[in-house]
Image (spheres, rainbow, N blue to C red):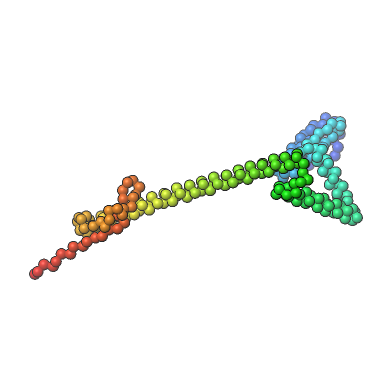
């Protein structure tokens, strides 16, 4: 039989209430932890027991979550008021313009422009950032070159294997050609090799002729 439906109301018995609180608290915190991991969510849970004891879980810093919550509540309240909404978006636009200005300034510094306003420490920090970036770029470039070399070696090995197979097929074809001539003429002397140097090397040390000439000797008909 399934469990009966539990009526959600305050548990009168203090012992039962404490046991239920302990079980459900653990389940709630477990679910909060799973939610933060599975969905990459920022989760914060604060629980005060009936005796005033604090229990909490936060996927990051609880203070950061609370601060973010306060800002979002403030934004939400502002959006409920049309005048506040206009002010909010004006402030947001100003913030984005300031952020864009800082990014453009940083980009100019990286490109070596407008450095006169930087002191020695700022220039040193910029130099370190550029060296780290350069090191990262060189590492990516070296890895790309290694990948290309591996791919070329793979293609070279594949072509070499295919080349050997072609040599074997050519060698087999010439062997079949020689066997056919032996069956027709009974001797291999009918094959005249045009050039002994025109032989294709085959794996295993054998070779085959690329050019051959054949002389056919026809018998004269006998007088009857």
Along the line of sight, the residue nearer the viewer: 188 or 145:
145
Q: Residue furthest front?
A: 116
Residue 70 appears left or right of 172: right
Position in image of residue 142 (x %, y %): 57, 44
The quadrant in which the N terminus is found is top right
**Residue 85 in view of the camera:** no
Position in image of residue 93 (x %, y %): 83, 53
Q: Residue at x 57, y 47 (%)?
A: 144
**Residue 75 in view of the camera:** yes
Along the line of sight, the residue nearer the viewer: 31 or 63:
63
Q: Is residue 222 above or below residue 109?
A: below
Q: Quadrant of residue 46?
A: top right
Along the line of sight, the residue nearer the viewer: 125 or 207:
125
Q: Residue at x 35, y 53 (%)?
A: 169
Position in image of residue 191 (x %, y %): 23, 57
Q: Residue furthest top?
A: 15
Q: Residue at x 23, y 57 (%)?
A: 192
């Amino acid at each position: 039989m399934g469990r009966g439906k539990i009526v959600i109301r305050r548990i009168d018995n203090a012992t039962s209430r404490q046991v239920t609180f302990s079980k459900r608290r653990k389940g709630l915190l477990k679910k909060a932890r799973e939610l933060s991991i599975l969905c990459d969510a920022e989760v914060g849970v604060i629980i005060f027991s009936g005796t005033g004891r604090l229990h909490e879980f936060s996927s990051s810093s609880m203070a950061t979550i609370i601060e973010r919550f306060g800002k979002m509540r403030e934004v939400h309240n502002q959006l409920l008021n049309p005048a506040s909404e206009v002010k909010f978006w004006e402030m947001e636009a100003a913030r984005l313009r300031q952020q864009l200005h800082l990014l453009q300034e940083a980009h100019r510094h990286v490109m070596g422009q407008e450095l006169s306003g930087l002191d020695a420490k700022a220039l040193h920090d910029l130099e370190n950032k550029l060296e780290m970036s350069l090191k990262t770029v060189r590492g990516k470039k070296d890895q790309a070159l290694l990948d290309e070399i591996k791919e070329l070696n793979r293609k070279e090995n594949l072509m070499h294997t295919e080349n050997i197979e072609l040599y074997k097929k050519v060698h087999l074809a010439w062997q079949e050609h020689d066997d056919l001539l032996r069956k027709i003429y009974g001797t291999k002397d009918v094959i005249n090799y045009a050039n002994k140097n025109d032989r294709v090397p085959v794996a295993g040390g054998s070779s085959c002729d690329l050019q051959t000439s054949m002389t056919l000797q026809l018998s004269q008909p006998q007088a009857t």
